[in-house]
């Protein structure tokens, strides 16, 4: 769904709000117009960068300055001053706070409608440009296919892909669709980027986890239509005992030790495994591997004798 421009009116006097709504309703076509009762209501609305606020310097419950955190998030705001004397707002103050237009009562109705129409047109043009931006088209296309793709297809790799290829695909997508890249776009685009990022993080958490990946591959084999992993499934460590190692540095040490054992460099393997065991104490996999390396080392000494 495309984000639609809305006009919100916030004033102290109901007669002023009703008059402005009636005026805009007859001049600005196809744009919803809502009259807000107070500042609190404004803060409760999920505003977007396509919204417009028409506000007066007189409010029923607070200063108009208090609305600026919201006003700066939306497409623009028009400030109308009904006050007199020292409390009256000037053009200089309106410019300071970034008002799209400023009017001092009494003012010509045609000038107000002209300012609103120009702002609506500007936002519509901005939206049209945004929707035709290549990266946003790609964002939408990827999101549309999200539920049709399994975790491998999300990263554009085959089922038996190497861990390095999966990581490369993940990093590429994480950078391309990171929500921070869309923070100046519409609320819809920001949410789409967030949903995509959440899903690819989920996919990588499964494919980068040896045991989860084994379970997931079996799931795809048995039920190809089921694309997502069930995190309630209890994953056993029997197939990949090295996954019991929590510390990444320890994993590297064990990997080096395994390579050293294959090269028959048992003394080096023992050193690595002892360091690993001192960090992750009580890990039976490391202890068993150390025992294996020690036995093989002892056997080589026996053969020399």
Image (cartoon, rainbow, N blue to C red):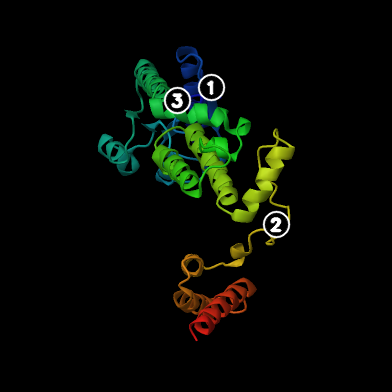
Asked if residue 206 shows in the view, the reply is: yes
**Secondary element type, mark 1:** loop
Q: In this view, does 268 lie above or below 36?
A: below
Discs 1, 3 touching: Cβ within 8 Å: no
| Image vertical order of residue 255 relative to residue 48, above or below | below
Q: Distance between the residues labelled 1 and 3?
A: 27 Å
> Do tag 2 and tag 1 residues touch (Cβ < 8 Å)?
no
Q: Distance between the residues labelled 2 and 3?
A: 38 Å
Sort mark 1 into few (<14), some (14-19) or many (20+) by Cα contacts within 10 Å.
few
* Disc 2: CA contacts within 10 A as few (<14), some (14-19) or many (>=20): few
Q: What element carries label 3?
A: helix
Which residue matches tag 3? 137
Sequence-wise, the earlier of marks 2 and 3 is: 3
User: Disc 2 or disc 1, which is closer to the eye?
Assistant: 2
- Residue nearest the viewer, comparing 270 with 216: 270
Residue 63 in the image, given as x and y percentages of width and height: 43, 45
Say whether disc 1 or disc 3 marks the residue closer to the N-terminus: 1
Crowding around mark 3 (Cα neighbors within 10 Å: few <14, some 14 to 19, many 20+) is few
Q: Single out the mark in the foreground, 2 or 3.
A: 2
Residue 96 image position (x, y, % from top left): 28, 41
Q: Give the SS element for disc 2.
A: loop
According to the picture, the residue beneath numbered tag 1 turns out to be: 32
Point out residue 71 in the picture as x, y percentages from the top left corner.
Answer: 42, 38
Residue in the image at 36% along x and 17% along y: 114
Query: Of 193 and 240, which appears nearest the observer?
Result: 240
Q: Mark 2 points at which residue?
A: 235
Q: Residue 222 placed where, x, y %?
A: 74, 39
Figure check: 275 above or below 174: below
N-terminal-most mark, 2 or 1: 1
Direction from residue 82 to residue 8 in the image, left or right: right
In which quadrant is the N terminus drawn? top right
> Mark 2 and 3 residues: CB-CB less than 8 Å, in contact?
no
């Amino acid at each position: 769904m495309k984000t639609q421009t809305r006009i919100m009116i916030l004033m102290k006097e109901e007669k002023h709000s009703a008059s402005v709504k009636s005026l805009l309703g007859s001049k600005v076509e196809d744009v919803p117009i809502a009259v807000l009762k107070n500042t609190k209501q404004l803060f409760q609305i999920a505003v977007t960068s396509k919204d417009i606020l028409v506000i007066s310097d007189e409010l029923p419950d607070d200063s108009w300055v208090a609305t600026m955190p919201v006003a700066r998030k939306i497409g623009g705001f028009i400030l109308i001053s009904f006050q007199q004397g020292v409390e009256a707002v000037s053009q200089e103050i309106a410019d300071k706070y970034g008002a799209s237009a400023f009017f001092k009562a009494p003012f010509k109705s045609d000038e107000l409608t002209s300012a609103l129409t120009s702002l609506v047109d500007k936002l519509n043009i901005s939206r049209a440009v945004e929707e035709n931006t290549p990266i946003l088209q790609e964002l939408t296309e990827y999101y549309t296919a999200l539920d049709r793709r399994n975790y491998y297809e999300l990263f554009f790799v085959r089922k038996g892909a190497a861990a390095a290829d999966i990581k490369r695909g993940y990093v590429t997508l994480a950078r391309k669709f990171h929500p921070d890249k869309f923070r100046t776009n519409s609320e819809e685009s920001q949410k789409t980027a967030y949903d995509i990022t959440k899903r690819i993080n989920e996919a990588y958490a499964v494919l980068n986890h040896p045991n989860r990946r084994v379970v997931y591959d079996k799931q795809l084999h048995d039920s190809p239509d089921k694309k997502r992993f069930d995190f309630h499934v209890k994953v056993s460590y029997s197939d990949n005992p090295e996954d019991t190692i929590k510390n990444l540095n320890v994993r590297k040490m064990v990997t080096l030790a395994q390579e050293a054992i294959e090269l028959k460099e048992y003394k080096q393997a023992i050193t690595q495994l002892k360091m690993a065991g001192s960090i992750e104490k009580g890990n039976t996999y490391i202890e068993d591997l150390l025992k294996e390396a020690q036995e093989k080392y002892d056997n080589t000494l026996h053969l020399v004798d």
